Amino acid sequence: MSSNGASPAQRSDNGTVPAGERNPRARQRALAIGVVAGRPGDDIELAELAELLRTAGVATAGTMVQQREQPDPDRYFGRGKLKELAAEIKRCDANLVVCDDELLPRQERNLEAELGVPVLDRTAVILDIFADHAHSASGKLQVELAQLEYNLARMRGLWTHLERLGAGIGTRGPGESQIETDRRLARDRIAALRRELRGVERSRETMRKERSRSAVPTVALAGYTNAGKSTLLNAITGAGVGVGDRLFHTLDPTTRSFEHDGRRYLLTDTVGFIRKLPHQLVDAFKATLEETTLADLILHVVDASEPPASRAVAMGAVDEVLAEIGAGDTPRLVVFNKVDLLDDEERQRLLVGRRGIVGVSAVTGEGIDELLDAIEEAFAATLEPMDLLIPYEQGASLSELHAIAGDLDREDGPDGVRVQAKVPRALVHRFEAYATR
């Protein structure tokens, strides 16, 4: 997460990676903590945090929850609970504490001072995973931007050993401390990254305009991370993209085409969502997430094998992120994936008698044909039937119509080609000159 590529858990107190500790992840044992409001006896879902830690290569040594309406503004936990936490750290032999919320810089500093071990929040863990999984140039730019914005407020904690006045002529302002220099350099780098990402966004906008001119229906896969979106993309399009049993395996958008009943569609897989998705990532990955906002139809992919409570949390988190990025009103089809892991009773309860829901297994191929039919049905309402007579000399228009409408009911006549086709309403104006009625 720092410029030297080390995560917060890997840095020593002076911000460097100590010799012999270049790959300490396998030796990290984290105690996961969280605050939950509600009646005594309620519990918090720390399973997701444990899965994030697993993806980051960190073992979860134990968990601890405090019941309170709001986290303590200075230490996250109350003073009494902190004593229990310190004892629990020793009992389970943890060398790291990870919080299920984003910590204020002062909360992080005070916790480390009280507990004597490094303290991270879920945002730091997610950023570390993103940095590890980003492969494309744009993905790396987006991750670096999110990391810098997150760390900017924490630079006092990271660089306290450098808070002294600098005297180098031409290297820093007169009387400017090292911490101020570091912050200025970070802000300059953030501005440069934003400029680079605007260029990436312009390139993507050009590609989107090309796709919109072809009027090919666009479908986006959205869902909780690790719900099987990439596997579903492969099952539908044969894309062959990499998949893995870990959170945020896919960061960069992947678009592939497929055909069904003679009509061509574009299917895009994007970054998975998660509960409490950090705002830095929503902002940094705006260009990527826009692939979802511009789709004609969203397939909300849900892991059907999850327990009902966890499934409801995941679906709610996806709904929140879609609303946040401006895709809340886009037509949506719910796809319950991994139905091969359900018994007959669970399938009956989940799928029977519910409209707008399709059950599939991206691994076995079960339900894929039904899903494609549902996609076709969703777009059918946006198509306008047209009877056309296209002169032979207008072959380009006939080719364009075929690309837009798929298979055509056509008959060659003396004056041209008589065609019956279903055309997207937004493109009817292109062919009105050939309409016979």
Image (cartoon, rainbow, N blue to C red):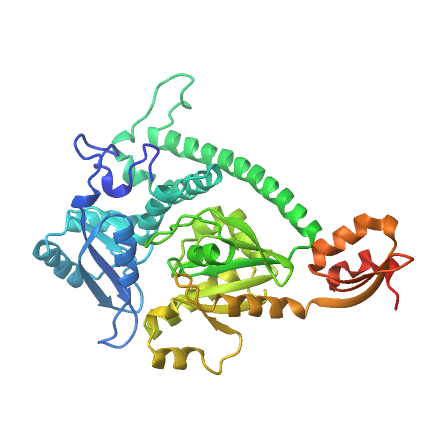
**Percent of width and height locating residue 296:** 61, 61
Tag count in the figure? 0
- Above or below residue 310? Residue 91 is above
- Above or below residue 302? Residue 351 is below
Q: Quarter-wise, where is residue 382 in the image?
A: bottom right
Which part of the image, by quadrant, shows the N terminus? Answer: top left
Q: Is residue 151 left or right of residue 261?
A: left
**Percent of width and height locating residue 41:** 22, 76
- Above or below residue 153? Residue 299 is below
Residue at x-position 40% and y-position 34%:
183
Q: Is residue 398 left or right of residue 279?
A: right
Which part of the image, by quadrant, shows the C terminus? Answer: bottom right
**Percent of width and height locating residue 289:** 51, 52
Residue at x-position 48% and y-position 56%:
233
Of residue 249 and residue 89, the one placed in the foreground of this image is 249
**Percent of width and height locating residue 30:** 19, 52
Q: Is residue 184 left or right of residue 407?
A: left
Q: Is residue 263 left or right of residue 142?
A: right
Residue at x-position 32% and y-position 55%:
245
Q: Is residue 32 something that shows in the picture?
A: yes
Of residue 147 and residue 28, the one placed in the foreground of this image is 28
Q: Is residue 304 something that shows in the picture?
A: no
Q: Quarter-wise, where is residue 215 in the image?
A: bottom right
